[in-house]
Structure formats: structure tokens, C-alpha cells
Image (tube, rainbow, N blue to C red):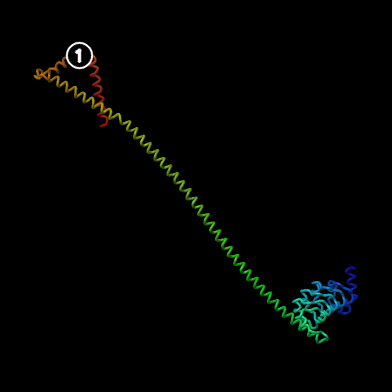
């Protein structure tokens, strides 16, 4: 059937503010169709085969009276407490054992029938008998009170659970902060170690540079020292001939003195009265022989004299040069 036909059929079941859907062999509640008729505040769903109410049933907040007797209900929706306008609820002869905790929120409920349901002991005791109007009103009052007690227990349990969850969350946060603090400290320590490592590397590099500079300086000093030594050696070598020349001059001086001494001795032995002395005899003989030889070697002697003169002149010049 189409939605329009369903709406039309449901319209046929409406009389005033009442909808009679009893004895229709229903297995589920036509929630969508009932939601279209907000003026229908009384719904009779008795004597059907309904096993459960859909969650959307709790959105029919306009309902004031609902008859679900003689069905196969095993439970009610958890949000049944949303039916805040509900005053009359008939659940006679179903298969309910417990009611949802939100049942305590049905503050407008004045009449309730839970007979012939396999209720758990505490709920059955609170419901009592519902054999007349007064007992059904008392059933509604006592069941609401009983459910409020359960609601309080649930609230306390939920509060304890929330407290435990908060405590666990707090402990987790503390552990998280401790872990973050340890990680932060570890990162800080790693940065410090890395910085110290870089500092050591830098110091090592600077030390290597300083060592190279020092080695370079030593090498340069060594080169300078070697250069100075070479220069000093060169100066020594350059100045060495001067003492040599001086030595030669000294030799010439000694030779000249020797010749002068010999000439003096020869002159004394030749020209003075000493010529008759035994000492001068060999001198005069040697002198005579020398003169004879000299006459014979006149050219050689002349050359020797020239050489001696040149040597003497060079000697005199060498001795006068330092003074200038």
C-alpha cells in the first residue's frame, strides 16, 4: 500500500482525538502515520502482535493515553521518558521484565497497568495489583518512585563512573605531562650534547688551524734562520779573503824585514870592522856568491824586485782600505 493509502486507512481509524488500531494484527507501530495526526492524543494498539516499539515512537510527544495491552512486548525504548505528555499507559499482559530508567521522567503519568508481565521482583513489588482505578493510580505513583530510585542509582553510578573516568583522565594527563617533560628534558639534553660536540669540533678545528699556523711560522722562522745563516756564511765567505790578504801582507812584511835584516847583517859584515870576525866570514862569502849569482841573474832579480814592489804596494793599499 502507498503512503497515501496508509494515511487514508489510518484516517478511517480516527474518531475525534482517538485512534483505534486494536485487533489489526499489527507487528509494528505505524509511527510515521501517527506522527501526521498530532490531534490524535489517544491510541489503542491492544490485541496485536507487537514485539517492540521503534525508537521513533518516543517522538510522539503529543500522546496522552496509550493502550498496548495484550501484545508481545519484551522491552520499551530507552527514551520512553520523552513522552512527557503521557498520563495513561496500559501494558497489561505483555512479556516485560524491566522498564527503562528513563521511565522515571514520565512525570505526567497518573495511571499504569503492569499486570500479567514477568516483572523482576523489586519492580513487581512496586507495581502491586491493578484491579481498580485506585490501584492503577497507585501503581503509576509507586513505579515512578521506584524508577526514580533506580534513576538516582544510575546517576550515582554514572557520576562515579565519570569521576573514575576523570581521575583516569587526570592520571593520563599527569603521565602525559611527565612523558612530555621527560621528552623535553631528553631533547634539551640532546641539544646540549650536540652543542658540546660542535664546540669540541670547533675547538679541534681552531687547534688544528693554530697548529698549522705555528708550524708555518716555525717553517718561516727556519727559512729565515737558514737564509740569515746563508747570508752570514756569504758575508763570512766574502770577508774571509781579507784576513787571507792580511796574512799574505804579514808574510811579505816578515820577508821584507828578513831581507832588510840580512841586508843589515851583510852591510855590517861588509862595511864595518866586523868583516874580519869569524861570524861575518861565511856571510861575506855567501854575499859574494849571491852578488855573483845576482849579477848572473840580474834579469831575475829585477823581476823579483818588481814583484816585491807590486806586492808591497798591494799590501799598503789593503791596509789603507779599511781606514777609508
Asked if residue 48 is positioned above or below residue 221 in the image, the reply reads below
Task: Using the image as rendered, state which of residue 185 and residue 241 is in the foreground.
Answer: 185
Q: Where is residue 86 in the image (x, y as percent from the top left)?
A: 80, 79
Q: What secondary structure is marked by label 1?
A: helix
Provide residue 161's location: percent of width, then percent of height.
Answer: 67, 73
Q: Where is residue 228 in the image (x, y as percent from the top left)?
A: 36, 37
> Can you say whether 116 is above or below 262 in the image?
below
Q: Looking at the rendering, which quadrant does residue 50 occupy?
A: bottom right
Give the residue at mark 1: 293
- In the depicted structure, whether residue 46 falls above or below residue 317: below
Give the total number of marks visible in the rendering. Answer: 1
Residue 41 appears in the rendering = no
Whether residue 26 is visible: yes
Picture quarter containing residue 145? bottom right
Q: Name the side, left or right, on which 180 lies relative to 284.
A: right
Judge the density around disc 1: few (<14), some (14-19), many (≥20) Cα neighbours within 10 Å.
few
Question: Residue, x 50% and y 54% (percent of image)?
Answer: 196
Residue 202 vertical placement versus 42 (above, below): above
Specify the farthest residue to the top: 296
Q: Percent x, y for residue 107?
A: 76, 81
Residue 146 location, quadrant: bottom right
Observer-nearest residue: 255 or 321?
255
> Quarter holding the N terminus?
bottom right
Quarter of the picture containing the C terminus is top left
Amino acid at each position: 500500500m502507498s503512503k497515501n493509502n496508509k494515511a487514508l486507512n489510518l484516517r478511517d481509524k480516527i474518531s475525534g482525538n482517538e485512534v483505534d488500531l486494536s485487533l489489526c494484527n499489527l507487528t509494528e507501530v505505524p509511527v510515521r502515520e501517527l506522527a501526521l495526526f498530532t490531534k490524535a492524543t489517544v491510541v489503542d494498539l491492544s490485541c496485536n502482535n507487537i514485539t517492540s516499539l521503534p525508537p521513533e515512537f518516543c517522538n510522539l510527544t503529543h500522546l496522552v493515553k496509550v493502550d498496548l495491552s495484550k501484545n508481545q512486548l519484551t522491552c520499551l525504548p530507552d527514551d520512553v521518558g520523552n513522552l512527557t505528555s503521557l498520563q495513561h499507559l496500559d501494558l497489561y499482559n505483555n512479556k516485560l521484565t524491566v522498564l527503562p530508567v528513563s521511565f522515571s521522567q514520565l512525570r505526567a503519568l497518573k495511571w499504569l497497568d503492569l499486570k500479567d508481565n514477568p516483572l523482576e521482583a523489586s519492580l513487581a513489588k512496586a507495581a502491586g495489583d491493578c484491579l481498580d482505578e485506585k490501584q492503577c493510580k497507585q501503581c503509576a505513583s509507586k513505579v515512578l518512585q521506584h524508577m526514580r530510585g533506580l534513576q538516582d542509582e544510575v546517576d550515582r553510578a554514572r557520576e562515579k563512573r565519570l569521576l573514575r573516568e576523570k581521575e583516569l583522565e587526570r592520571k593520563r594527563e599527569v603521565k602525559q605531562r611527565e612523558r612530555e617533560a621527560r621528552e623535553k628534558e631528553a631533547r634539551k639534553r640532546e641539544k646540549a650534547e650536540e652543542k658540546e660536540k660542535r664546540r669540541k669540533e670547533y675547538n679541534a678545528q681552531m687547534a688544528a688551524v693554530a697548529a698549522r699556523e705555528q708550524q708555518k711560522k716555525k717553517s718561516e722562522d727556519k727559512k729565515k734562520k737558514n737564509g740569515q745563516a746563508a747570508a752570514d756564511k756569504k758575508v763570512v765567505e766574502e770577508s774571509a779573503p781579507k784576513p787571507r790578504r792580511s796574512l799574505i801582507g804579514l808574510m811579505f812584511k816578515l820577508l821584507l824585514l828578513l831581507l832588510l835584516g840580512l841586508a843589515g847583517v851583510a852591510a855590517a859584515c861588509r862595511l864595518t870592522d866586523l868583516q874580519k870576525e869569524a861570524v861575518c866570514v861565511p856571510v861575506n862569502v855567501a854575499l859574494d856568491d849571491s852578488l855573483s849569482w845576482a849579477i848572473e841573474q840580474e834579469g831575475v832579480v829585477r823581476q823579483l824586485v818588481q814583484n816585491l814592489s807590486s806586492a808591497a804596494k798591494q799590501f799598503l793599499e789593503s791596509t789603507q782600505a779599511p781606514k777609508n
